[in-house]
Amino acid sequence: MAVMNPEANRGILQPQAILTPEQLAAGRTGESGIVVTSLEKAVGWARTRSMWPALFGLACCAIEMMHTQTARTDMSRYGMELMRASPRQSDLIIVAGRLSRKMAPVIRKIYDQMPEPKWVISMGDCASCGGVFNNYALVQGCDEVIPVDVYVAGCPPRPEALMHGILKLHEKVRAEGIDGWNDRGGGFGITVG
Amino acid sequence: MTIQTDVETAVLPAERAARAATRFGEKVRVDDEGAWVVEAASLPEVARALRDDFALDYLINLTCVDWPDRFETVYHMASIQGGPPLCLKVAADKAKPIVPSLTGVFAGADFQEREVYDMFGVRFAGHPNLRRILMWEGFAGYPLRKDWREAYYEDDNKPLKSRWPEGDFFFGEDKIADWDDNIKYPSGYQAEGVESSRADDNIVVLDADELHRAPSGSERLIVNMGPQHPSTHGVFQMRLTLDGETVVDLQPVMGYMHRNHEKIGERNLWLGNMPFTDRLDYLAQLGNEWGYALTVEKLMGLEVPERAEYIRVILAELNRIQSHFWSITFLLNDIGAFFTPMMYAIEERELILDLFEMATGSRLMCNYMRFGGLAYDLPEEFLTMAQTLVDDRLERAIDEMDAYLSGNEIVLERMQGVGVLPPDMAINFSTSGPVLRASGVPYDVRRAEPYGVYDRFDWDVVTRPEGDVFARYMVRVGEMRQSLRILKQALRDLPGGEIMGGKKAWQIRVPAGQAYGRVENPRGELGFYCVSDGKANPYRYHVKSPCFVNLTALAEMTKGHKVADTVAILGSIDIVLGEVDR
């Protein structure tokens, strides 16, 4: 697992203004026009503020996923209102629902088509561990096919729970640096819900 | 066409038996439950005679039961005028099960027979396209047969012994190390160097002739839409054969969400199935629960207290409204009004889900109904909130949507005259729900075979004569208004008293027998066919899914239209894949 920095959540772009004493005296702190931060923080900030999810719903959880986009929870607050119908334009795939063996190759193909960096949220019990369905037809957790960053528990998770999962993912993305998304530390994601 | 509840054509069982004896002679025997046991060879003849002479012109369900000594295909036929269905049974040999296909008599038998073939291995002689439908081609075995073994469980049926307090807890996977029971390899099979047979499923091999130039001079083209496609409402695939941009042929490919709900249902305890039914059509949870509860109540002969019946009506009608909101706005999504109408509709939907949460504890997966009543009573605030919603908010929302959309130039242009399904064809294809009623057939299970307390309310069956996409849209709008009418009456008349009938018990006993129960879900007639052998689990548990059967008519509706219209037509059928694939 990527190391979660509790500080990562706040002050990503804390302006450390370089000001002349005259400017300070005049109280014109906002005019210096310079913000100093690390590249990692800037990249993390950019990635979390325009993370486009793929339009990919499987089952019941997809209904709650769509509810997450609408007025009450309003995912677009985080620049996520665009569910991309093409995997080639998306950064995040939310596996919302049970994954059958017939569908498993398809989801892998979709994941492979997504440009890097890319993240995966496994939404709900079925996608995370098979849930209440355990037989020949179902893959017992989508992490058998694709690497998962965040698991959201619930059957189905409420929109708030998915939101929690998305925020956790944001936290992770900000903390993992520029190339950290590729390192899923042995395949253990974060579990919320 | 008018609907009569006391139909002359719905023949009484005794009279039916007498007429069967004279008409069909040796070919038909009436068993003690009133079902007709038909000789396999004369099935098409009997079915055709029933359709043409006995007015049983509507095939509502087709399934199969695996008995120890035989396979038994089961058909439920009803009259489009209303009345209870007649059950036909045909026995097939255990070793080599072959039954004549009914596709020549009822086009709606097509997919259902393919499903029986897929799950039981019963072959239907004369079926035009007998291939697997839910599993992929090349899958070995027939999962719904009783000799199918799951690798994960130590017992076939619940309750699993190891989970009892005195039992040792262990995982079935650890104990059953070999998977031999489930996997049958052909003789001479070499594991190395074998390409997955699954790949074949995605390749359509066509005749060279078929790919020759079409009359228009252009080359035919095959386009796979789905399973991941924004227009398919889930994981559903359409294989289109195109001539230019015109659809020549369409093959639906499904099963991408198949988890064998029925097999799970046969392993579970009777009551343990209730939460699973929520996950069938996840936009009509309470309707599903009602259908299952109704069927088992039929088997057990339970009376449901009046208050529980009214609460069921209230919740089911609220359910219908939220489901229609969803499907209408998704149809608009499909024709290009992306997401904006949905944002509006989901506002009201959220409020209805709040009511569900208040009553049942969950927004989507309610698990609220029980055999003989309900799990618990409504909280006090529910009624005031529901009353406000019904009196004030919902009516306004429906009117608003109607005013914005129904007269819109683009909506009319894209919907009118597209995907026309004539009434005779709609009946022959066994379609149900808004698809059937938009073709001008006033068939609604709430009228045709009233269940619950629907016969006490004053409401109309909404129909439209055109049979196109716009008619289906308008029928849904009309049905929401009718649901509001029913809701107003039900909230006004809601009596007090018990919410659970029958004797209180931890474990229910379901007497041996079979029952077919059906309810009018937002998507059409949802049926449950349950066979009990008196044990703790259902012997056979079949779900007749309205979406699955309505899809049979999809190819017929789309032929000759453009690709963009295909999207609108699929949207107007309004499928939910959880129920199509089960």
Image (cartoon, coloured by chain):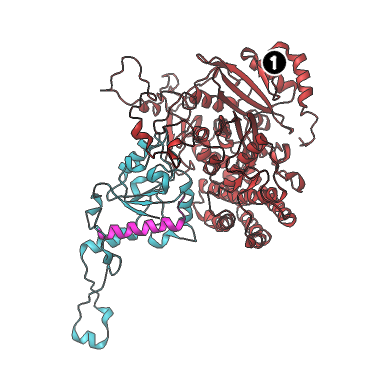
> Image point 68% across, 32% down: which residue?
B423
Q: Nearer the viewer, residue B207 or B212?
A: B207
- The chain letter corresponding to cyan is A
Residue B392 figure quarter: bottom right
Which SS type dominates the magenta stretch? Answer: helix
The residue at the far top in this view is B26
In this rendering, does residue A145 appear at all?
no
Residue at the disc numbered 1? B28
Q: Is residue B106 above or below residue A131?
A: above
> Image point 52% across, 57% down: which residue?
B343
Chain hosting mark 1: B
Task: Answer few, some or many: residues within 10 Å of disc 1's Cα (few below 14, many 20 plus, some between 14 and 19).
Answer: many
The residue at the far bottom in this view is A25
Whether residue B231 sits left or right of residue B63 in the image: it is left
Residue B454 figure quarter: top right
Quadrant housing the N terminus of chain B:
top right
The part of the chain drawn in magenta is: A156-175
Q: Residue B95: percent from the left, percent from the top? A: 50, 14
Q: Residue B318: percent from the left, percent from the top? A: 63, 52
Q: Nearer the viewer, residue A118 or B571?
A: A118
In this rendering, does residue B484 appear at all?
yes
Residue A174 lies in the magenta-colored region? yes
Q: Nearer the viewer, residue B68 or B114?
A: B68
The kind of residue tagged 1 is Val
Mark 1 secondary-structure assignment: strand
- The chain letter corresponding to red is B
Residue B295 figure quarter: top right
Q: Nearer the viewer, residue B498 or B119?
A: B498
Q: Residue B394: percent from the left, percent from the top? A: 64, 58
Whether residue B60 sits left or right of residue B283 in the image: it is right
Q: Is residue B126 above or below residue B450?
A: above
